[in-house]
């Protein structure tokens, strides 16, 4: 079964109101062709789960600027004044999560765990409304998994079956979200024949990837 | 020497050969420039690399290799890249020797507030809560006061980053160590008196006869 599709067809499958996990860290390693197509198709009322909202006009920041997002779950929004302005205006709900906790909550969903327990956030505002558990004399927060309807993954290389490898810090949340969403759409800079990526170099296995699109060449 | 350079040079003396170190964005990043000769330290960027270096002069930046602020960096031979779960496994799992962060407030319990000012600035905590909760040693590198107001307080008034006490506070005026008994003034900057430090500090500082003049890395 070929997973190859066009950017337009892949984004056609995403309805208004969808919950999206999007890879990237300050725009590095974001699936920019898929993001541009979300804007072009004017998908509305999106929930975005990602490390950050980058900057205006960069990566996930484009979705914020186009006012397509109703809720963000992220660790940091400080570099995007538009995210903060929409939050203050009440048009955008923002749920701030410590970065390591966000990674583990996504991982927990993808790995079939019922929760993660972490020392991060104990005794701070992050603890509000959450259960704590004492283990071995230490207090931990019980943090629940986060899953999504779609994961928009950015890869350096993909083979035709959908095996993915990543480059340097463009990896970040991409392999985690690829495990945690009902439908996984991968955007790759290079799509190569099966076998070109050594088994030891495959970070995300094809079995979790549903659709594969080629990154537009002018869209790094 | 300006205040930030002085702070960075003093913090650099805290790093030991073989340490895995995470430097926050801004002032803490400057510490890497002043690493003493012969000290081999691995720098982590929490977006997914250990073995980062400043982008070499004249090098072409890679869109796939940035620091946690999104700025292009380089990678040293022996560097390794990883996802965000691994990155915070290193941080939270007791593998990170030192983290250097900026601060808005630190209090007599050594607790740090550095991620939000309610109603004014809500950038998010990023990795700061995990770093302060998880690193073996936490160093706060910050100016001693903000707009003339003390930042080292009896109790933090801003939301805490962690309830865990930081280990060391380095400012342009002083080096202060946290202890179970309270904050101990260890060093004063060249040309700064103990009384000047006390006047610029709201928290009670324990002052012994051992206060020395701050030394800095070259």
Image (cartoon, coloured by chain):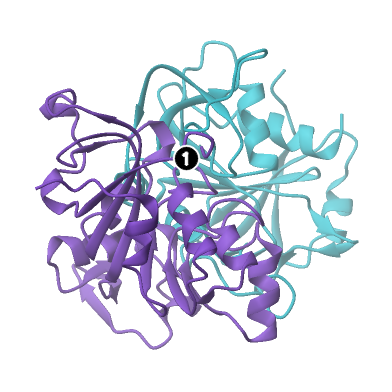
- The colour chain A appears in is purple
Task: Tell me which residue sits at (44%, 69%) in the image.
Answer: A48
Q: Nearer the viewer, residue B121 or A187?
A: A187
Direction from residue B40 to residue B155 in the image, left or right:
right
Q: From the rendered image, report the letter of the chain displayed in cyan.
A: B
Task: Tell me which residue sits at (39%, 88%) in the image.
Answer: A129
Q: Nearer the viewer, residue B98 or A82?
A: A82
Badge 1 element: strand
- The answer to whether residue B18 of the structure is visible from this angle is yes
Answer above or below: position of A211 versus A125.
above
Direction from residue B58 to residue A59 in the image, left or right:
left
Task: Tell me which residue sits at (36%, 75%) in the image.
Answer: A15
Q: Residues within 10 Å of mark 1 (few under 14, many from 20)?
A: many
- Tally the numbered discs: 1
Answer above or below: position of B138 versus A52.
above
Residue B78 lies in what quarter of the image?
Answer: top left
Measured as percent of width and height from the top left, residue B170 is found at 68, 44
Answer above or below: position of B147 versus A161.
below
Q: Nearer the viewer, residue B27 or B155?
A: B27
Query: What residue would you read off at disc 1?
Result: B98
Task: Tell me which residue sits at (54%, 23%) in the image.
Answer: B53
Pinpoint the chain carrying mark 1. Answer: B
Residue A197 lies in what quarter of the image?
Answer: top left
- The answer to whether residue B117 of the structure is visible from this angle is no
Direction from residue A191 to residue B18 in the image, left or right:
right
Measured as percent of width and height from the top left, residue A174 is found at 33, 49
Measured as percent of width and height from the top left, residue B56 is found at 61, 16
């Amino acid at each position: 079964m070929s997973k190859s599709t066009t950017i337009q067809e892949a984004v056609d499958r995403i309805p208004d109101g969808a919950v999206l996990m999007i890879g990237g860290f300050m725009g590095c390693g974001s699936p920019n062709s898929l993001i541009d197509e979300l804007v072009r198709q004017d998908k509305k009322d999106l929930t975005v789960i990602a490390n950050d909202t980058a900057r205006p006009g960069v990566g996930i920041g484009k979705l914020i600027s186009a006012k397509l997002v109703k809720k963000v779950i992220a660790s940091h929004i400080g570099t995007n004044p538009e995210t903060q302005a929409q939050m203050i205006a009440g048009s955008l709900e923002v749920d701030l999560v410590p970065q390591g906790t966000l990674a583990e909550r996504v991982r927990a969903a993808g790995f079939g765990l019922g929760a993660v327990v972490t020392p991060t956030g104990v005794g701070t505002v992050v603890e509000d409304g959450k259960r704590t558990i004492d283990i071995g004399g230490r207090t931990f927060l019980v943090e629940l998994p986060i899953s999504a309807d779609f994961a928009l993954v950015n890869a350096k290389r993909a083979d035709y079956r959908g095996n993915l490898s990543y480059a340097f810090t463009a990896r970040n949340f991409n392999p985690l979200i690829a495990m945690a969403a009902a439908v996984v759409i991968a955007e790759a800079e290079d799509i190569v024949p099966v076998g070109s990526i050594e088994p030891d170099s495959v970070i995300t296995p094809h079995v979790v990837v549903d659709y594969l699109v080629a990154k537009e060449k002018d869209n790094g | 020497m300006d205040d930030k350079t002085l702070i960075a040079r003093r913090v650099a003396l805290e790093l030991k050969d073989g340490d895995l170190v995470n430097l926050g964005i801004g002032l803490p990043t400057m510490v890497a420039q002043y690493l003493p000769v012969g000290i081999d330290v691995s720098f982590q960027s929490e977006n997914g690399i250990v073995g980062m270096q400043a982008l070499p002069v004249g090098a072409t930046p890679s869109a796939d290799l940035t620091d946690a602020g999104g700025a292009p960096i380089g990678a040293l031979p022996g560097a390794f890249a990883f996802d965000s779960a691994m990155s915070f496994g290193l941080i939270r799992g007791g593998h990170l020797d030192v983290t250097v962060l900026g601060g808005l407030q630190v209090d007599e319990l050594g607790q740090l507030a550095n991620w939000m000012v309610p109603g004014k600035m809500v950038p998010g905590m990023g990795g700061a809560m995990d770093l302060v909760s998880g690193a073996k040693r936490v160093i706060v590198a910050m100016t001693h006061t903000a707009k003339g107001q003390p930042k080292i307080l009896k109790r933090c008034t801003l939301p805490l980053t962690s309830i865990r006490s930081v280990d060391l506070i380095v400012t342009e005026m002083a080096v202060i160590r946290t202890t179970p008994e309270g904050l101990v003034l260890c060093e004063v900057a060249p040309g700064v008196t103990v009384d000047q430090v006390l006047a610029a500090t709201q928290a009670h500082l324990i002052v012994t006869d051992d206060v020395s003049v701050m030394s800095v890395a070259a």
